[in-house]
Image: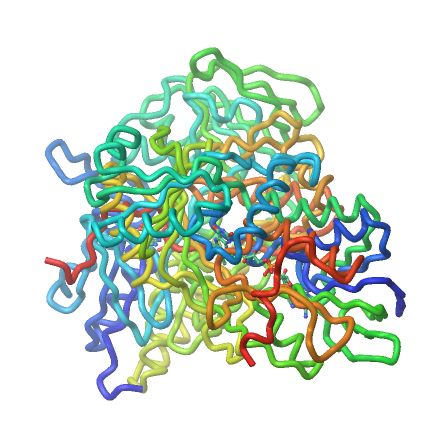
Amino acid sequence: MSQSPLPPVVIGAGPAGIRAAVTLARHGLSPILLDESPRPGGQIYRQPPAGPGQRSASELYGFEAAKATAIHQALAPYADRIDYRPDTLVWNVERGALDLLSNGRTATLAYHSLIFATGATDRVLPMPGWTMPGVFTLGGAQIALKAQGCGIGSTVVFLGTGPLLYLIAYQYAKAGATVAAVLDTSAFGLRIKHLPGLLALPKVLAKGLYYTAWLKAYGVPVYTGITPVRAEGNERVASVIWQDSAGRQQHTACDGLGIGYGLRPETQLADMAGCAFSFNPLDRAWLPDRDSAGRSSLAGVYLAGDGAGITGADAAEVGGERAALALLQDQGATIDPSRVAVLEKRMAAFVRFRTALLQAFPLPAARWAETVSDDLVLCRCEEITAGDLRATVRKDQPRDLNRLKALSRIGMGRCQGRMCGAAAAELLAHQHGCAVNDIARIRPQTPIKPIPIGVTPENTP
Amino acid sequence: MSRLIEADVAIVGGGIVGGSAALFLARAGKKVVLLERDRCGSRASGVNYGGVRRQGRAPQQLPLAQRSHALWGQLPDLIGEDGEYVRSGHLKLARSPQDMAVLEAYAAQVADYGLGLQLLSAHELRQMFPMIGDKAVGGSLCPEDGHANPRLVSPAFSRAATAAGATIIEGAPVSEVEQTSSGFRLRSVAQDLTVTAPVLLNCAGAWSGALAARLGETLPISAAHPLMAVTEPLPAFLPVSIGVEGGGVYGRQVTRGNFIFGGGRGIPHPVSGNAPVPDFARPERGALVNLLQQAAELFPDLAGATIIRSWSGVEAYTPDHEPIIGPSSTIPGLFHACGFSGAGFQTGPAVGAVLADLVMSGQSVTPIAAFSADRFR
Ligand SMILES: Cc1cc2nc3c(=O)[nH]c(=O)nc-3n(C[C@H](O)[C@H](O)[C@H](O)COP(=O)(O)OP(=O)(O)OC[C@H]3O[C@@H](n4cnc5c(N)ncnc54)[C@H](O)[C@@H]3O)c2cc1C
Ligand SMILES: Cc1cc2nc3c(=O)[nH]c(=O)nc-3n(C[C@H](O)[C@H](O)[C@H](O)COP(=O)(O)OP(=O)(O)OC[C@H]3O[C@@H](n4cnc5c(N)ncnc54)[C@H](O)[C@@H]3O)c2cc1C
């Protein structure tokens, strides 16, 4: 190890990364904070582009306005200590250094210690009609509302599962859109069954119940235990066909549809760095291994927030601070043990809550894989259908997603499997009659997001 | 349950070379067992650039390349699919008058082999291929060279071999190999499998040296890792596969529109592994950025395009960059086919056919004397 360690690097300026950077700064370190977005806040506290006509925090973030503002302002007191670099994509990790793309220039940044706080994005299960104009992911629907101030339609349906379904429906209804239906694939009974776990965080539960009650009070139809059938329309989505919990076909007219089945952690960078991974049956995803403080399997590499397993924004703040303290501890700094105890206790409650939540809103994977029709496009980048995948399975019996990718091109397009990976994994596992953890995961390839051929290395004039 | 298979021919390695050998031998009626440690066509043969090119090969490789050229022409009959093989032409560019002189000398040297090379002046080049930037001062076109999709072609050779009656066992790393009085005994502990055969074909790619070493023979094989990248789909702009005299960058555009290009070297993966030949390879940042710059220089229109992926592979190299093909001079019944030094995809089908010749008749129809391992002694 060198005598003067390099500044710690934090990737992601969402709640986890911001809390991590601030904690490091408060303890006298000068971290570098990297984020590909133009402004701090991450997914949930995403800020609209700077400029005139800004809406107020309470308009944008509702109940979370105070937290959002706190996160947005958290960096300011440490501006001289935190080297915050927005608009900076980390596109590669290799042998102890990161590659950064900013303004068409690429630069290499060596690190000794690193916190991944890369967050999560929507998890999608395709349905017939999902590639039609007017159909968005839930995240896309929320960004359209928050960042651009316009929604995905005037009469909208939200379909999928998870708490975000209700939150986004609420946000749309409040913003004046007609929410024609909230269609949840999870049965209501599951929520009752997992109520004890959900009570680990009574305030969060109360908020969730509030959104649901509000939607009911304002006449928004909410259906649980549904099965999606298809989205229909000519040039644009005009209706959603679905089956109610009694198996009856229903039809809901709309001009915008948001789909989402919970979130999937952004783990490619941790994977490239060489962190050990295990399959997590709750997330139905491969997650980097970590201890309760956020230490990965690699010395000097830490994980915080949704990028290491979906636990939500409040937990991300706690996890970010805890990971930073672990980093400080490992570097020999003195930290306040009582603060560690408080954080660990809060994190334990988040974990209980998360466990119940993921069970109350499960991914309807088996049912989807069983019923998905051959002509359904799973990968929109490469236009690969479920039938193409099934044909590849019959021909070559791929036992692993990477082989399926090599032969069928699924996951080879622009999104590199970020959108279609979950669906491909479920279908492959179903075709083999094996568990989804038995088919490996797509190996990440650099660059993790597209970079221009015309990039200039930083040291060129 | 432990298994014993007695075969006429045992093959180690299910790349394009082993797959093709299995296909031709099974068709000739031999009882063939092929052991592949991973999946067939998952290594160099499945991740290469896909160049099906004769132009630029040393004259002694051209009979082999010509035999392969004929086989590529019958690909659907051979493997049951077209593998996206197209005879797009291969255009080798010169970036200086000196490089052009090299291309001219090569064209003269190989004039008798029937490649049909056409030398292009700067003016002709601009007229025929206006998308090429002004870095190029001329070129040499081989109209019947082309490219194919290695991810599809290479596994298909093994599938076709299976259909022809070969026994192909995947997930079967050969962990022990020994000479016996009647030939060879191979063990794959992972499969609890033993294979015996009087004839053994070493088609283990970059790992061929390790296999030979276990039988007491030294082959001068080292591994290196060609670097590749691919753009998102672009409007059709490049009808021909491109190479450059002196190297640096090469590229082709596939029907879907993606531009696939290569040049420079990746690094072993995992990095910390200290095996002489790594299991995998991955890109290296400096080489990748350099490759992007070279591509942008050659094709100015590409500067705004984005790459969506890059990768590398583990390829076997020999000191003189010519392959090792033929019988072992120390161990009877053992044949090597390895060390293709970045160019064995085009020749792979013919190398399999040559191995079948050697097994069936003790002689290759195609001259291979230049590829004897003895040249390194
Ligand atoms: C649509 C949507 C709505 C949500 N609503 C709620 C809610 O109401 N309540 C709740 O508790 N949770 C909600 N969540 C979840 C919430 O967003 C997360 O729990 C929270 O944002 C996690 O914080 P984080 O810091 O871990 O990650 P994020 O907030 O996602 O931040 C990660 C940051 O990392 C950056 N990043 C990632 N990869 C790279 C890279 N390679 N290079 C550079 N930067 C990178 C991203 O740009 C991003 O800014 C929502 C999530 C989504 C997608
Ligand atoms: C990135 C890249 C680009 C290239 N571009 C081109 C090109 O454009 N044109 C061209 O002609 N050539 C190209 N090549 C070279 C070409 O791919 C190779 O020469 C050719 O594929 C070699 O085939 P092979 O069957 O010998 O090797 P491989 O495909 O590597 O097959 C060897 C097989 O042996 C198996 N094996 C090894 N050890 C054992 C064991 N102990 N037990 C069981 N199985 C074992 C391996 O798993 C592997 O599948 C390129 C190579 C690379 C890596």
Q: Residue at horizontal 15%, vertical 69%?
A: A81
Residue A112 spot, x, y in % from top left: 31, 76
**Which of the two residues, A264 or B298, is positioned nearer the viewer here?**
B298
Q: Residue at x 41, y 22 (%)?
A: A134
User: From where the camera sits, is residue A357 visible?
Assistant: no
- In the depicted structure, whether residue B187 falls above or below residue B261: below
Q: For the C terminus of chain A, which image quadrant?
A: bottom left
Q: Quadrant of residue B2?
A: bottom right
Residue sitting at 68 percent across and 48 percent down? A398
Residue A126, compared with residue A414, is above or below; it is: above
Compared across the picture, whether A65 is left or right of A234 comes to left
Q: Which colour assignment does the render follow?
A: rainbow
Q: Nearer the viewer, residue A280 or A384?
A: A384
Query: Height in image: B365 above or below A5?
Result: above
Q: Position of residue A261 (x, y in %)?
A: 53, 39
Q: Nearer the viewer, residue B1 or B356?
A: B356
Q: How many marks?
A: 0
- Residue at point 46% right, 69% down? B320
Q: Position of residue A97 (x, y in %)?
A: 31, 69
Q: Is residue B300 visible?
A: yes
Q: Is residue A191 left or right of residue A66?
A: right
Which of the two residues, B180 or A446, is positioned nearer the viewer here?
Answer: B180
Residue furthest to the top: A234
Image quarter (top left, top right, bottom left or bottom right) of the N terminus of chain A? bottom left
User: How far across and how far down the image is residue A381, in percent?
Assistant: 46, 34
Query: Hey, which quadrant is residue A178 in on the image?
Result: top left
